[in-house]
Amino acid sequence: MASIWERKKSDGSTSFTVRWRNPETRKQEGITFSTASEAETLKRLLDANNQSFEIAQRAMVKNQTKAPTVAAVIQEHIDLLVRPSVGTVHTYQTMLKLHIADVIGHIPWTSWTTGI
């Protein structure tokens, strides 16, 4: 089980070190963060993934991705159309709802564009 060690530095600030035992090497490892929330996030991910830092790191990076979803980019395109007819907007919205939103709409746009 991972643990968090809080440490006061000489400049008055606080650092938070997450420590855990690597399941493969059985050696203790640690990473220091400047905020308690970052440390708590890593601790929870390590505990949920059998102390595997690789899995926890991938989850943290994925969680920090602020890229819009495919559905959000398409919706923005529809919203930015210049003088579209009511029928065009209705058709595009219907296509987004029926063919994209539930299928690939949740995928981050950066994942979609790099996969092509």
Image (cartoon, grey):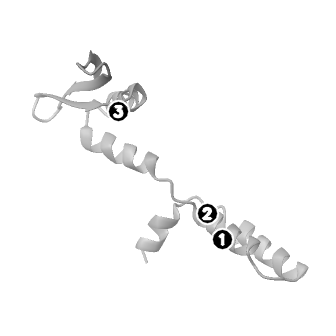
Q: Badge 2 local density, few (<14 within 10 Å), some, or many (20+)? A: some
Alpha-carbon distance for marks 3 and 1?
33 Å
Q: Is residue 98 left or right of residue 52?
A: right
User: Looking at the picture, how far across and down is residue 3, in whole percent?
Assistant: 29, 19
Residue beneath disc 1: 74
The reply to whether dot 2 and dot 1 touch (C-beta < 8 Å) is: yes
Q: Badge 1 local density, few (<14 within 10 Å), some, or many (20+)? A: some
Between label 3 and label 2, give the one nearer the viewer. Answer: 3
Residue placed most toward the observer, 89 or 25: 89
- Circle 2 — which element? loop
Location of residue 87 (image quadrant): bottom right
- Circle 1 — which element? helix
- Which badge, 3 or 2, comes first in the chain's sequence? 3
- Which badge, 2 or 1, comes first in the chain's sequence? 1
**Furthest-right residue in view?**
86
User: Looking at the picture, how far across and down is residue 39, in whole percent?
Assistant: 35, 28
For badge 2, the amino acid type reads Gly
Residue beneath disc 2: 105
Residue at x 84% of width, y 83% of height:
83
For badge 1, the amino acid type reads Ile
Residue 54 in sight from this viewpoint: yes
- Which badge, 3 or 1, comes first in the chain's sequence? 3
- Circle 3 — which element? helix
Q: In the figure, 116 relative to 2: above or below?
A: below
Residue beneath disc 3: 42
Residue 1 in sight from this viewpoint: no
For badge 3, the amino acid type reads Leu
Residue at x 47% of width, y 66% of height:
110
